[in-house]
Image (spheres, rainbow, N blue to C red):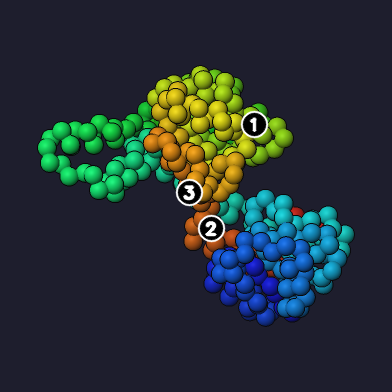
Amino acid sequence: MRCLVTAAFHEDGLRILRELMNVDYRSWRDTGKVYLDGGELVSLINEVGAEVLVVESDFVTRDTIEKCNLKIIASCRDDPYNVDVRAATAKGIPVIYAPRRNTVAVAELAVALMLAAMRRVVKADRILRSGRVEYKSSRDFVDVYNATVGFELSGKKVGIVGLGAIGFEVAKRLKAFDVEILVYDPYVDPEKVKAVNGRLVGLEELFRESDVVTVHCKLTQETAGMIREEHFAVMKPTAFFVNLARGAIVDEDALFKALRERWIAGAALDVVQQDPAQSDNRFLTLDNVVLTPHIGGNTHDTIRRQSVMVAEDIRAILKGGKPKNVLNPEVLR
């Protein structure tokens, strides 16, 4: 049996797979191709003779499934929208995925970006790198100090939009900062809110009361464009906005206006509408924004976690056992 892996995969996961079959490892991080189009993927699968396929961003369509002799498909994602599960099920192919693979990574970055924005970390770094700081007089020191005065997170109100897996992990980490947690999530279990000592509120109330608003809901028809100018208009002038979910959840023009006109103190963004952000992104023209190019889950730990999860489930199937994370368990019966 042969396996084709186009996902980023840790050696620990590859070791498990190599004990079971021949593995052709072609990570997108090495090839430079984030995803292969349908024709390329079909050709590669058939060239390798793969019966087991492990992807991360490649779209495994019905056409791909019909044209290849696959026995197992694995997606190294916790939202495996890139695999046609219905088509795989029709052919009796189990589809493995990796839930919560990057939950901790995104939650930790959310807290890091809050602190970076509130304490003006990036602005201070840019000032020093500019080459203009020499402290020839006390006035020079005062100017730098005044330009980088920040806010403490301790004692503030943090509003979390979406208390799913990531939002919950963010709330857990914020406990150490002695903050008050506000939650907007129409579908959350109240016990989950209670577990982080949070308080359920409406969306407008959350924006009005919070010192920091951090977004962690999924992008759906309901949440697309959900955060609008009216929400930024009621925020405190000392408040910060953080988004590590999806850029399309936010009216980006309204956010830019709020930041440029100083309705709010600042923002930290890992996602934008034209994602990932490039060097010409307009938010980089503002000195009250920290912007990163969608790196929320980009850690060595995430790669190892997804690799071991997927590899162990593939091993379970091949050994006649029960995988932990399979989207269509009915095919294994």
Residue name at image x 75 percent, y 61 percent: 60
> How far, Cα to Cα, is label 3 from label 2?
26 Å
Residue at mark 2: 302
Q: How many marks?
A: 3
Residue name at image x 53 percent, y 47 percent: 277
Residue at mark 3: 279
Mark 3 or mark 2: whose residue is earlier in sequence? 3
Mark 3: which secondary structure? loop
- Residue 184 as seen in the image, left or right of residue 242: right
Which residue ends up furthest to the right in the rendered image? 90
Q: Which amino acid does the dot numbered 2 rest on?
A: Thr
Q: Which amino acid does the dot numbered 1 rest on?
A: Gly
Indicate whether 128 appears above or below 87.
Answer: above
- Give the image location of residue 326, x and y in percent: 73, 58
Indicate whether 323 appears above or below 146.
Answer: below
Q: Mark number for residue 225?
A: 1
- Give the image location of residue 40, x and y in percent: 73, 68
Query: In the picture, which quadrant includes the N terminus?
Result: bottom right
Indicate whether 308 appears above or below 146.
Answer: below
Which mark is in front, 1 or 3? 3
Which mark is in front, 1 or 2? 1
Mark 2: which secondary structure? helix
> How far, Cα to Cα, is label 1 from label 3?
24 Å
Mark 1: which secondary structure? loop
Asked if residue 264 shows in the view, the reply is no
Give the image quarter of residue 261. Answer: top left
- Residue 141 as seen in the image, left or right of residue 1: left
Mark 2: few/some/many CA within 10 Å (<14, 14-19, 20+): many
Q: Which amino acid does the dot numbered 3 rest on?
A: Ser
Residue name at image x 62 percent, y 38 percent: 248
